[in-house]
């Protein structure tokens, strides 16, 4: 048996990451494996989100302005 593929979560406009942390925490409590990424155009918000999410190694944040250019879009299945 191969291990289950983790679910992948992308939040665009994540701010300080409160919602994304809650989603990841809920997944963990239910035994689900997930990878999560939060994007925001505010460097301040991203820094705050990263600082508050240190206990979530599978949660990363990036400073992205989606109205400029999407980074590595092929990583995500955007439907």
Image: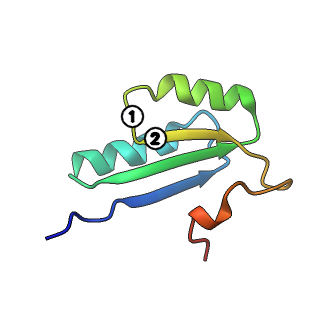
Cα distance in 3D space between marks 1 and 2 = 5 Å
Quadrant in which the N terminus is drawn: bottom left
Q: What residue is shown with label 2? A: 59
Quadrant in which the C terminus is drawn: bottom right
Q: Secondary structure at mark 2?
A: strand
User: Going 26% across and 55% down the picture, which residue do you hit?
Assistant: 32
Is disc 1 surrounded by few (<14), some (14 to 19) or many (20+) residues within 10 Å? some
User: Going 57% across and 65% down the picture, which residue do you hit?
Assistant: 76
Q: Which x, y percent locates residue 66?
A: 78, 54
Q: Residue furthest right?
A: 68
Q: What residue is shown with label 1? A: 56
Q: Secondary structure at mark 1?
A: loop
Is disc 2 surrounded by few (<14), some (14 to 19) or many (20+) residues within 10 Å? many
User: Going 75% across and 57% down the picture, which residue do you hit?
Assistant: 70
- Total marks shown come to 2
Q: Residue furthest left?
A: 1
Q: Which x, y percent locates residue 58?
A: 40, 42
User: Going 39% across and 35% down the picture, which residue do you hit?
Assistant: 57
Above or below, comparing residue 64 to residue 10 in the picture: above
Between 47 and 5, the residue placed more toward the observer is 5
Q: Which x, y percent locates residue 13?
A: 68, 47
Give the quarter of the image for residue 7. bottom left
Above or below, comparing residue 27 to residue 58 in the picture: below
Q: Which mark is residue 24?
A: none
Q: Contact, CB < 8 Å: mark 1 with mark 2? A: yes
Q: Which x, y percent locates residue 61?
A: 58, 39
Above or below, comparing residue 70 to residue 49 in the picture: below
Above or below, comparing residue 8 to residue 78 in the picture: above
Residue 44 relative to residue 68: left or right:
left
């Amino acid at each position: 048996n191969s291990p289950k593929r983790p679910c992948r979560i992308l939040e665009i406009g994540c701010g300080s990451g409160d919602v994304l942390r809650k989603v990841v925490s809920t997944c963990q409590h239910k035994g689900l494996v997930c990878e999560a990424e939060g994007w925001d155009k505010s460097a301040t918000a991203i820094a705050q989100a990263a600082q508050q999410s240190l206990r979530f190694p599978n949660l990363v944040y990036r400073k992205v302005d989606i109205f400029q250019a999407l980074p590595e879009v092929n990583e995500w299945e955007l439907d």
